[in-house]
Amino acid sequence: MPGPFEITREQIDIAVDLPEIGFAFCDSIEKMQPEQLGEPEINFLERVSKAVPNDLKLRAVKQLGTIVSVEEYKKGWRLAAVKSLKDVLTAENEILVRMEALRVFQKKNDLFDCEEVRNITHWLSNQQTINKNKTILLSDDDIMRSECMIDFLKYGGFENILYERDPFETLDVVKRVKPDLIITDMSKPRINGFEMAQAIKSNPELEHIPILLLSALYFEKDPTHDIFCATMTLPQSLERILLLVNTILAGNYTSNKK
């Protein structure tokens, strides 16, 4: 049964160019009953999941995740949604969008017997095992918050966690150790998190290191997207923080990682 409205290729093009229309289409799809979902809606979500802006792309990825996870949707559409999410995991550079796609494959469902789902789930499990041995450097002058974050990371199985309160000492450790991930806050003594990150990214030997900003400050529009690999406003759940860290460390999905 097709959906209650037909989304043409021309309408999809308009929705990509005009996000307010894209969000309106997402609202309509979200209100559909599973049996109403059809090829036009799947095509729309697949296209928008690769589009801009990121908030519209994230909305489409979340809806694709719902389709994969809910058994009432037709299996064919669920598998089509899996393929779209695999494409996101393979090619998407925006960490928070990729994290949302990865979240779908954290829990087993009735599609686990499908080869594509099994491959992604197996890759994720392997990457999480590899991630536990990677070095994470936490830079935060708030001791209580840092102790909480270290406990979070240890609970998630991460074994190599370094901690520095002072941003200049952090820079020294980065040069010496070259960690796999730096987690920082924004407010710091002497220089802030953005200035510290700029110093790291200006060094050709260090610019490849991802820097995650976790801050209680709210950024309506992140002006630092070229400096930080992702920005997340605190507080957040333990599950979400660990998924974000694993997403960054895992990188993009490659099917040969089995």
Image: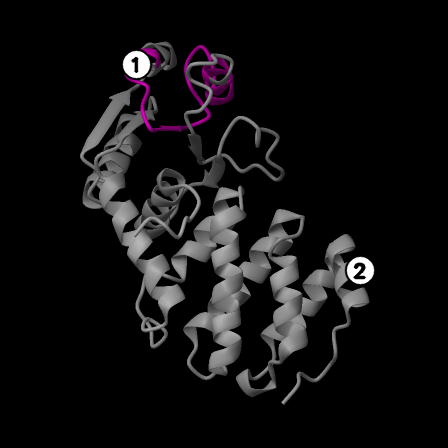
The residue shown at (44%, 50%) is: 99
* Residue type beneath disc 2: Ile
Q: Is residue 184 magenta?
A: yes
Q: Is residue 183 above or below residue 82?
A: above
The residue lying toward the viewer, choosing from 5 and 223, is 5
The amino acid pointed to by label 1 is Val
Q: At which x and y percent is residue 214?
A: 42, 35
Residue 100: in sight, yes or no?
Answer: yes
Task: Tell me, for residue 14, which label it has, or none.
Answer: 2
The residues colored magenta run 175-200
* Vertical placement of residue 194 versus 17, above or below: above
The residue positioned 67% from the left and 48% from the top of the image is 53
Q: Residues within 10 Å of mark 1 (few under 14, many from 20)?
A: some
Query: How far is the residue under mark 1 from the one under mark 2?
Result: 49 Å
Tell whether 134 sits left or right of 250.
Answer: left
Answer yes or no: do the residues labelled 1 and 2 have beta carbons within 8 Å? no
Percent across and percent down for residue 173 are: 30, 14
Q: Is residue 160 left or right of residue 43?
A: left
Residue at x-position 44% and y-position 24%? 208
Q: Quadrant of the N terminus?
A: bottom right
Q: Residue at x 39, y 47 (%)?
A: 236
Choose between 245 and 42: the one closer to the eye. 42
Residue 188: quadrant of the picture:
top left
The label nearer to you, 1 versus 2, is 2
Q: Which residue is mark 1?
A: 173
Residue placed most toward the observer, 63 or 113: 113
